[in-house]
Image (cartoon, rainbow, N blue to C red):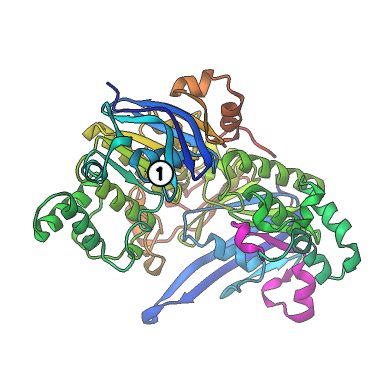
Amino acid sequence: MALLEINHVDISYGKTLTVSDCSLTLNEGEICSIVGESGSGKTTVIRAVMGLLPGGGRVSAGDILFEGESLLAYDQKKWRSLRGHEISMIFQDSGAMMNQTRKIGNTFVEYIRTHENISKQEAWKKGTEMLERMRLPDGDRIMHSYPFQLSGGMRQRVGIAMGMTYQPKLLLADEPTSALDVTTQAQIVRQMMELRDEYGTSIILVTHDLGVAAYMGDKIVVMKNGKIEDQGDRDHMLHETENPYTQLLLDAVPSLGGKRYV
Amino acid sequence: MFDETDLILEARHVTRRFPAAGGRELVACNDVNLKFYKGKTLGLVGESGCGKSTFMRFLVWLDTPTEGEILYKGKDITRMKGKELWENRRHIQMVFQDPSTSFNPKMRIRDIVCEPLLNYRRINPSEKDAAARRLLEMVELPGEFADRFPHNMSGGQRQRVAIARALALEPEIIIMDEATSALDVSVQKTIVELITRLQREKSITIGFICHNLGFIQSFAHQVAVMYLGNIVEILPGESVSEKAMHPYTEALIGSVFDTKMDFSKKVVPIRGEPPSPLDVPAGCPFQDRCSRCREICRRERPTLRTVAPDHEVACHLFEKGGSAI
């Protein structure tokens, strides 16, 4: 059984159909990259999986199955037990999802204590350990910092550490490296690949960077105007696909020692 | 490849220090020497905070260096004032990263692209329609866009308008600060095609700031790599993938993901993050992240040395005639 199945899903905001007929299957330990231009609906799809469609957004047709169970039938309580434990999400800038006036430790302890019943001291210790496992040296200092005191790469690692606290089966990553420098991007990409190797986490990666998508993804999904334009495994998508839009995107990726304009 | 008679702008020993809290100082640009040639593109690459934007801002008078001089056709532009400054500003224009914040949202596109022309009395207000149409067509936009507001356009279209505005006064140099970073790859490609075409037609000099080495080498004639305020390597764009020598340039190359790479290969990112520009270590600025750091690197700061025609490297590994010791 596939870990996640999205079957012919339509997503609308109010009366506007934003994503139509989207189908996607993800197996355990698999990484799927969703690529597309801005506004193509790629973030909307993973937000629907997490049950986090913003105001007025809803799945208007089709079904989303996680381990064979329909997520659309979930009530608040069931969502709570699922989010963080089974599915978690990393955002483009993890610093922005945290309260700027509270220390990382404060936010992290609250996060842990909503998921399990432990004391503040234990939660603090757990958070520190998690930060150190995600290669943030000196976890205690980071727990005592405010989000704005950390660099973009460090904030993103804090976001990954929070998301991975309960070793979820599925990690949804929404442009996790787009705001970072290339060198930091390479570090984060490598770290996310290691999550799969160490914990067997499946990842859905939303990105507009085809290079990263191709490096990480076993599968690549190309979206355009709210529809899935093309999908397949990596080798097929890079070398064999005949879809003109995919080829257009591939041609646009600058490559070292590749095409020059001058 | 570069002819000294085509030299149009030259930065000599440009240094910029900012005062910081506690009596310390932050050196944003340290002894930067760069040359811009007519009709060529100079790409300036580096991580955020390395001083690349600080440097380019000197060229458009948004800031002045603490030390050093910038010669435009032999005249130091950092000391210009009044009328002379006003007359020279039109030769060097700028395109910013995010056109939605560099335009006045309440102005129509016609007024945006014609404003520089009106400022310099190149046209009468009655000629605005024709001028706007001509400029928009130059950047491959329909002339009717003149009636629009910036928010009615996509990011790529707005960036074209920004290019049209920068080109309105027919400048000799255009500075582009991450002008394509906010755009999708497919749009990025069309913008590059546009600027390289305009460059060929009008032989404009371009200074392009970018953080993606893979992208910049596809259209820059010269690439300068900057790290913590220091230029560590300057080399011709076409030889970036083969001849780059500095360990930092190699690290940047190693961080480029493209669709033609070998996916079985593990990415080997460089360690850590750049240190704070407030406490740059003595010796080589890259020492703490370099895998080939030696004792001399901790003691002495390497200077740029020519290792091949148009290729300079600042690294102790390549002293004595360009081969690693």
Relative vertical location of residue A211 with respect to residue B115 in this rendering, above or below: above
Label 1 secondary element:
strand
Using a 10 Å C-alpha cutoff, classify the residue at mark 1 as few (fewer than 14 neighbours), some (14 to 19) or many (20 or more). Answer: many
Q: Is residue A89 magenta?
A: no
Task: State the residue at coordinates (31%, 69%).
Answer: A101
Q: Residue at x 9, y 54 (%)?
A: A118
Q: Quadrant of residue A4?
A: top left
Asked which quadrant contains residue A111, the reply is bottom left
| Residue B259 seen anywhere in this rendered image of the structure | yes
| Magenta stretch bounds | B75-104
Along the viewing direction, whichever of B83 and A78 lies nearer the viewer: A78
Any magenta on residue B82? Answer: yes
- Quarter of the rendering containing residue B115: bottom right
Side of A250 relative to B133 (left or right):
left
Q: What percent of the width, then of the height, locates residue B292?
A: 35, 46
Report the number of discs: 1
* Vertical side of A149 occupied by A226: above or below: above
In the image, is residue B274 above or below residue B216?
A: below
How far from the left and from the top, in percent, is residue A49?
36, 38
The residue depicted at 39 percent of the width and 82 percent of the height is: B23
The residue nearer to you, when weighing A127 against A215, is A127
Residue picked out by circle 1 = A174
Q: Nearer the viewer, residue A56 or A38?
A: A56
Q: Is residue A62 left or right of residue B115?
A: left
Instruction: Evaluate whether residue B175 shows in this view.
Output: no
Q: Position of residue A188 (x, y in %)?
A: 35, 44
Q: Position of residue B277 (x, y in %)?
A: 41, 66
